[in-house]
Image: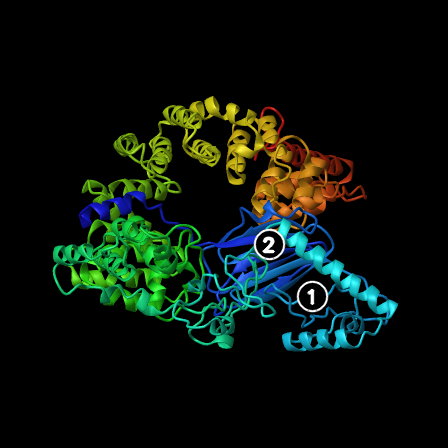
Amino acid sequence: MTFFLKLFAFFTLAAGATYASQIPVRSGAHTDFSRLVLDVPRSQAWSIEQRDWGATITIEGHVDGFDTSRVFNRIGQTHVRAVEGDASSLEVTYACECAVEVFRSGTMLVVDVSERTKEPSGTTRQIVSSTLRFVGSQQLRFTPDQTQDEASDQVQPSSLEASVAAEKSTLSVKEPLAKAEVSRLQQAQEQLASRIGFAASTGILQPSNLSVVSPLRTPHPHIDTSIFDSSMSSLGKEEENKPRNGNLRVTSSGDVPNSRNEVGDTSTTLGVQCIDPSEVRVQDWRPASSFSDAISSLRRTLFSEFDVIDNSVSVELARTYIYFGFGAEAKQVLSMSRDLLSQNRALVDIAGIMEFGSAPLGNHLENFLDCDSDVALWAILSAHDPKPSSSVNTQAALLTLSSLPMHLRDFLAPALSKKLLMFGDDTAAAAALRGLERALEELPNAAELAKADIEITQGDISTAQSRLEDIITSNDQQSAEALIRYVNTQLDAEVQISQDIATLVEAYAMEMRSDPLGRELQRAHVLALAKSGQFDTAFNALESLEHEDEVSDPEPLYSTLVLLLSKNASNTTFLKHAFIAVSEPAHKLQGKTADALARRLMNLGFYSEANAILSTRSGTPITKQRRLLLAELSLNLSRPRATLAYLSGMSGDQANRLRAQANLSIGDYDTAYELFFGLGDQDLRKRSAWLSENWDALVDPDDPAHGSVSEIVSSTVDFSDTSDGVLGRVEDALMESATAREAIEQLLSGYSDDGDYPN
C-alpha cells in the first residue's frame, strides 16, 4: 500500500471535528445538594453575583457561551430549576430557598447549590474537611451536622506508615473501644460506603484502567509493568512511582488534582510515570539503506534456524514500517507474538495512528498527554475522543512534529491540528500547520481542511466557507468532508444553499454509503435539502434513514429539520408538516426547536397547538426566552394573570410590554399607563389613561382630544350676576356647550368604526 493510499484511508475514516468552543456544563446529584461543573482554565478569572432567586457566574474573557444541553441528565429540579447561559455568563435559577457555593478544583469550576440552613441563635456550624486519605482522588468531607470536635473524634488523619504502625500496635495490645467511639466509627464507615456507592451508581466514580500495586502486598511478578515505564529495572522503582490516585478515578464533580509538583516533571498530572521517549522517537528509526533493502534484510532474519521469531528484529522491522508510514504492516509484524504486543504497547498505538488516524479506545499512549517529551505528540494523536483540557503539553508536541521527516509531517500535521482543536487550543492547532506553510508552496487539501476547522472555531465562517468551496471543487479525497463542514456551517445562516450542493451531497452519500463517513453524508444530505428549500424531499429522505438499522439516533436530525422548517419554510409548507410535528413524542423535539415551532404556530394564530407543544415539555428547564414565549402565549389565550406569573422577576422592554398588556386586560389601567409611558408607546398610554378612573389626572393637557375634554370637565360655569344679565349668561352657556360638543367630536373621531381605540 502506497503512502498516498494510506493517506486517503486516514481521512475517509476520520470523524468530523467538533467546532463548538462552548464551555460544557456537567452536573452531579448528591443527597443534600446539586453540583454543576465547568471546565475553566486556571488562568481565567471568574466572578459570581448571588440573588434571592438565583446566581450569575461570569467567566471573564469568555465569549462563546455555554453548553447546557446535558445539565438535567443526572440531576432533577430539587435545587436547580433552570440553567441558562449567554456569551460570558451562566445564570442558575433556584428551585428552592437555596444558596450557592463556588470553588475551584484543578481546571474545573465547581458550583454547589443547596438549601439554606437556619441555625439556632448563638451557634455556628462549620464544614470540616478531614485529611483522611482513601483510594479516590478527593479527601473525605463531613456533612454540616458534624462539629469540629465530632469530626476530629470520628476520623483521625494518618499517613500510610502511621496506619501500619497502628495496626501492629493493635495486634500486640488489644484495648476495647468505647461504645461511643465504636458508634462514631460505624457512622463514618456507613456514610463513606453510602457516598461511594451513590457516586459509583451515578457514574461519578469509574474504575481506573491503571494497574495499582498494593504497598502491603508483594508485587505479583506477572504484572505488565510497561503501563508505567518499560525502562524500569525493578518492582521497587515501579512501586515508588505508582499512580497517586489509586484504583478509583473521579470523572466529574472535581477531577484528579494536579500532582506534578509531587512526583516530578517526568510524571503526568495523574501521577503516572512517563514512558521512555526513545520508545516513540520515530525520527530516529530511518534505516541506513533504502526502504526495499532494509525490509528485505530484516525479513530474512526475522526467524531463527529453529523457526523462532526474533523479537528484536521484529521491533526493528515494525519501526522501519512506521517510519515510512505503513501502520497496518507494522501492526501485523507485532501481532506475530503475544509478547511483542504486550511489551511494545506504544509501538502498537503508533501503528494504529499511522493506519487509522488514532489509536483504539482505551489505548496506552493516551495516559501521557502532558509528558514533556516526544511522547506528548503521539499521546495527542492517539486520543480517541478528545475533550477540551488544559493538561496537554502542546509545546512538546509541536517541537516533536517539527523534527519529523517531511513525508510524515505532511501526513501528521493536519491530524495533530484537528486533535489540538478538539482539545480546545486553536492557537496550537494553527501552529501545527504553519510548519507546512513554510516548507510547501501549496498546502494539501488535508491541511486546508484543518485550517477551515480552525477558522470555523474562531468564528471566521465566511473565510472558512470560501476555503471549503475550493476543497469541494477540487474533487479530492477531502471533498466529502468539506461538503459536510460546508452544510453544517450554513445551518445558522439566513441564506439558502443551492440545490446543486444538495445534489452533490446526495451523490457522495450514495457513493460512500458503506464508508463510516457515509452516515455523516446522509445526515448532511437531509440538511442540505432543507437549506435549499426542498422540505418535502428532506422529510422523505429522513424517513428512509429512520428505517435503516445502521443509522443511529435520527431524532436530533428530525429536531434540526423541524427547526429549519419553522424558520425558513413558507406558511403552506410549514403548516403541512407542523401539525405532524405537534403529534410527535416530546423527546423528538429539542428545546429550541419546540420554542421555534410554537412561536411560528402562535404567529399564525394556532394558539392551542402552540400551547400543546410547550405543555408536553414540562420537564424541560424553563429558560428566559421560553418564559417570554409562554407569557405571550398566555396573553393570546386570554390568560393575563398567567402572563404576569411567567413574567415575575423579569425585566426588559419585551417583558414590560407583555406585562403592560396583561395589566390592561385585567383592568389595572394605572399600572398599564405607567408601563406604556416607560416604553414610549403613546397610543396605548393614552388608551390606558382614558380607561382609568383617574383619567382626568393622567391625560396630557396638550393632547388635542383628551386635553380639551379634561379641561371642560375640570372647568365650572359661573352663574353669578354680571352686568350682562340673563342674556349674557345664556350666551356664555351656549359657548361652553359648543366647545364641549367640539371636544367630544374630536375625541370620537379617534375611534375606529368598530368602537375600538386605534393602536
* Rendered residue at 51%/74% (across/down): 240
Location of the C terminus (image quadrant): top right
Q: Nearer the viewer, residue 391 or 719?
A: 391
**Place of residue 445 in the rendered image (x, y in percent of width and height, measured from the top left):** 22, 49
Please state which of residues 655 and 252 is positioned toward the viewer in this rendering.
252
Q: Earlier in the sequence, mark 1 or mark 2?
A: 1
Query: Which element is circle 1 on?
Result: loop
**Which residue lies under the disc numbered 1?**
141
Residue 283 percent location from the top left of the image = 23, 65
In terms of image quadrants, where is residue 722? top right
In the rendered image, the vertical position of residue 628 relative to residue 414, given as above or below:
above
Q: Are there few (<14), some (14-19), or many (20+) residues within 10 Å of tag 1?
A: some
Residue 645: image location, x then y, percent: 69, 42
Q: Splitting the image into 4 quarters, where does residue 150 fall?
A: bottom right
Does residue 163 appear in this view? yes
Residue 504 in which image quadrant: top left
Q: Which residue is mark 2?
A: 204
Q: Determine the residue positioned at 24% across, 62% down.
A: 434
Give percent across and percent down for residue 452. 29, 51
Whether 749 is drawn above or below 55: the answer is above
Distance CA(mark 1)–CA(mark 2) = 16 Å
Amino acid at the residue labelled 1:
Arg
Locate residue 3 relative to residue 276 in the image: left or right: left
